[in-house]
Image (tube, rainbow, N blue to C red):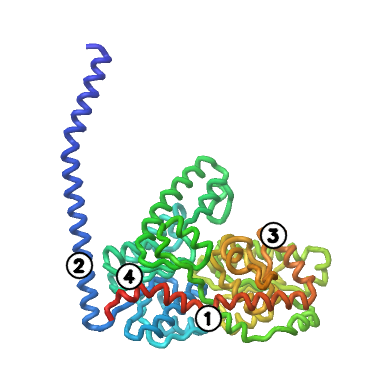
Amino acid sequence: MSAHDHLSCCLCDLIRLLWSLLLPCFYLSLVLTAILFLFIMGVRSWLQMKRKSRRAQDGRPAVAFFHPYCNAGGGGERVLWCALRALQNRYQDVSFVVYTGDQGVTAEEILDGARRRFNIRLSRAVKFVFLKHRFLVEAKLYPHFTLLGQSVGSIFLGWEALTEFVPDLYIDSMGYAFTLPVFRYLGGCHVGSYVHYPTISTDMLSVVRERNPRFNNADYISSNPVLSAIKVIYYCVFALLYGLAGSCSDVVMVNSTWTLGHILALWRAPNRTSVVYPPCDVQAFLDVPIGDEDEEKERKKCHSVVSVGQFRPEKDHRLQIKAFRKLLDRKGMEPAGRETVKLVLIGGCRNQEDEERVQMLKGLCLDLGVVDRVEFKLNIPFEELKKELTDATIGLHTMWNEHFGIGVVECMAAGTIILAHKSGGPKLDIVVPYDNGPTGFLADDEDSYADAMERILSMTPAARLEIRRRARLSVTRFSDQEFEGSFLSAVEPLMSTLRL
């Protein structure tokens, strides 16, 4: 027998073997699928029994919010507390629950923190379910494939939350989309979501494709075409999974035009998606009159540049400090300029990683020789924040593709001249012309930020006052009252599913 004939016989034998295995594999797949289906139905029945038992004791339906960092001081937490306040006022016969991973604090301390930081008081008690495994969604646990690791971790954290308390209605208010199918298909809950920032976006894919180094695209990856190609494939697969998870939501709320575009592209649920601008406590700032502040600052020869935002890497505080250094180096800013302007960085620290980042930023200030002109104010109460903003001349924001920018709105309401990043929510929704005039300034790198700050400081008090007044009038559309009306309208289809 020739070698060719021998090879043909081997191939025929292999094909016959594979064909003989096809039917058993098909049957095995059916059996495994049936076992998985029965297991899921069994878990679902068990959880529904837990819900019925809880309803028999409580007598009221329950709405649960998934917010593992509810004791943090960011804009996402303000959305949570304003949403709870609005729902409590509208639905008196509904219980409200918050899943949180904040350990070592009591419910009273969390509510007191919301009052101090956001000036928000709830009309009645909220039940807190304290989760023990929040570390599963911490980025530091996943040095590689961080998005996938955190998403899988959120599934387990969601499972812990569901087994601890089975609600009638579930709302993810922090962006953990992979918890939605857990509560919908295992818990049998109606689910909704408020998206602050898509976990992955087409912009992130563009950054990797174009091999641009950023905080979420390390230099060693952006400089290597093979690693960049692998990361593009990883991102595309993850985007598909993220879209499937998000599409489970019965109601989708997004916080800006920028977020809307990305969520529509990924979740593909236009009929269930609406823009609900986040609540900004603009009235507390609008109550402070403006008019003579610039003249007073001119007399004292002191101007402050204030930044408001959590100390997270994407907020890019390094850019703020470097641009401020360039401002001080500009002609006319030295030596007297160092005595007339200071940078104040205000924000919250969620964990040890954020605190270490603050120390790194302080080290950068030391290296650049501006340590005497930069102040750090962490987790400060609302009244102190209000004073800092109303006393400031410039409000500074540097996050690329900020999903919305509550801090930007607060700066404008307080009467500062806002200088924000030329992208995302600030560009599309906030720092836009009003009454045929500018409401602030936009920039995108160290030089353009330094140029804009120099320009603002060189303006006359009357010119600054005109922009400040126009900006104040423009931000009334982001008030707590506007948010509550939009939020209640968006969740009405969900709330109507509850058997009151």
Tag in front: 4 or 2 = 2
Q: Position of residue 9 (x, y in %)?
A: 21, 20
Name the secondary structure under disc 4.
helix
Residue 132 to residue 230: above or below? below
Amino acid on which disc 4 is placed: Ala
Going from N to C along the chain, the mark reached first, 4 or 1, is 1
Farthest residue in the top direction? 1
Which residue is the site of mark 1? 117
Residue sitting nearer the eye, 308 or 464: 464
Image point 46% across, 60% down: which residue? Answer: 263
- Which mark, by number, is residue 45? 2
Q: Position of residue 65 (x, y in %)?
A: 38, 73
Going from N to C along the chain, the mark reached first, 1 or 2, is 2
Are discs 1 and 3 less than 8 Å apart at CB?
Answer: no
Q: Quadrant of residue 133?
A: bottom left
Q: How many marks?
A: 4
Which residue is the site of mark 4? 161
Name the secondary structure under disc 1.
helix
